[in-house]
Image (cartoon, helix red, strand yellow):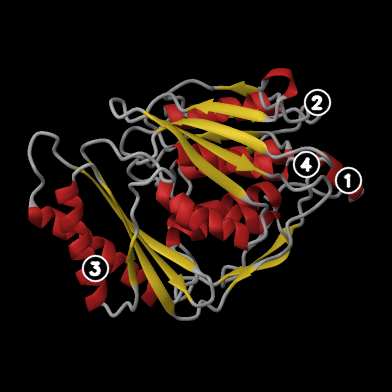
Amino acid sequence: MPERPVHLPGTTLEGGGQLLRNALALSSLARIPIHITSIRGNRSDGGGLKAQHLSGLLWLAQATGAVVEGAVRKSRGVVFRPSAGVRLDFGGLHGERKARIDVGGLGSVFLVFQAVLPVLVFSGCCCEGEGPITLTITGGTTVSHAPSYEYVKQVLLPTLLHIGLPPITLSHATHNPATGLSEVTFTITPLQRGVALSAFEIVERGEVRRVDVTVETRSRDTRGVVVEELCAGLGAMGFPEIKVLDIDSDETPPKTTPNNLNILLTLHTTTERTLASSAFQTLSSKKPPNISTLRHLASHAVKALSREWDSGRCVDQYMQDQLVVFQGLAEGRCKVDAGDNWEGSLHTQTARWVVLKMLGVEWDGRGECEGVGWRGGESWASRKEGEGGEGGQGK
């Protein structure tokens, strides 16, 4: 008799795509069947699966040999049953350690990446003598309400390296200015089979060392106005060193589409902690942007960074929720100092709820947890057998 799926109402807490991404990642990794209802039920667009959600879901289904119900666009309910006996299938030719995902439009490359990363890192598909995995995703890289290329490069990947994950690199292979589509390739080294991620702490943030300023836009005039406003605002806030990053080089991604403006402020501390704030705006393609609009956007980013620092936390609010799955999977007690908001954002609370339902991991009142010590190549069935059949999902 098939194991009964874990039911996850999609309207819980934040009620958006993150619940789906986290649930699919843990289901695929632990081979636990899930049933998600009212997918993205708190979204004003009516909810259901978008192309980006569907692309990640279908790749994970193929990779794990899952039986899936409801895998169509706009579907509000999905049953996902990964196979317990299937080794991860990358979909590459002749057993190549290469994977490719097409988002199917301008949906965020990096939100799809969030869904599949834990599976690739913890799947145990790295044996002695095997090299890293390359994952290529085609889609959008500057998308509203999603991490940008520069955020992933400057904040996410360095933080994941800091907590003990093997190195992950990314490169922009191609960019089509007409469509806005980009092809991004990640190089991922999984954990060795039988090896767990050690418990980690992100505490003691130290003092501000430097703030990096990144402004992506096609217009040099627009960039000049925004950079000047950002530097003035950061200086007025008392941040010491300010460094404007030049992204017009071969080592950085191609320029954004003509009418997009993306701002990223990355704060580096004396203890190697990284916090960031951002602002994004789609500008008119028919007339120059209003100067007051540009100044307002720059001011918004500066004030957001100041709030991040004043909160006392060691990671920004966007990074905090992306660490939850890794806290739950690590071996031992993990702590991420969230300053005066231990409860975290709705995204953080949602991620914790999913990990509780799937793995039984509980958080204390300060945002700490005891991870399950997931080892590369492990499955929930093998864990229950090792515990004499007493294991099980959180209720």
67, 393: nearer the viewer: 67
Q: Which residue is mark 4?
A: 124
Question: Upstream in the sequence, badge 4 or badge 2?
Answer: 2
Q: Position of 68 compared to 172: left or right?
A: right
113, 32: nearer the viewer: 113
Asked where in the image residue 105 lies, by quadrant, the reply is top left
Q: CA distance from mark 4 to mark 2?
A: 27 Å
The dot on residue 231 is: 3
Q: Which residue is mark 1?
A: 389
- The kind of residue tagged 2 is Met
Question: Upstream in the sequence, badge 3 or badge 2?
Answer: 2
Q: Which residue is mark 2?
A: 1
* Whether label 3 touches label 2, CB < 8 Å: no
Q: Position of 365 compared to 286: left or right?
A: right
Q: Secondary structure at mark 1?
A: loop
- The kind of residue tagged 4 is Gly
* Whether label 1 touches label 4, CB < 8 Å: no
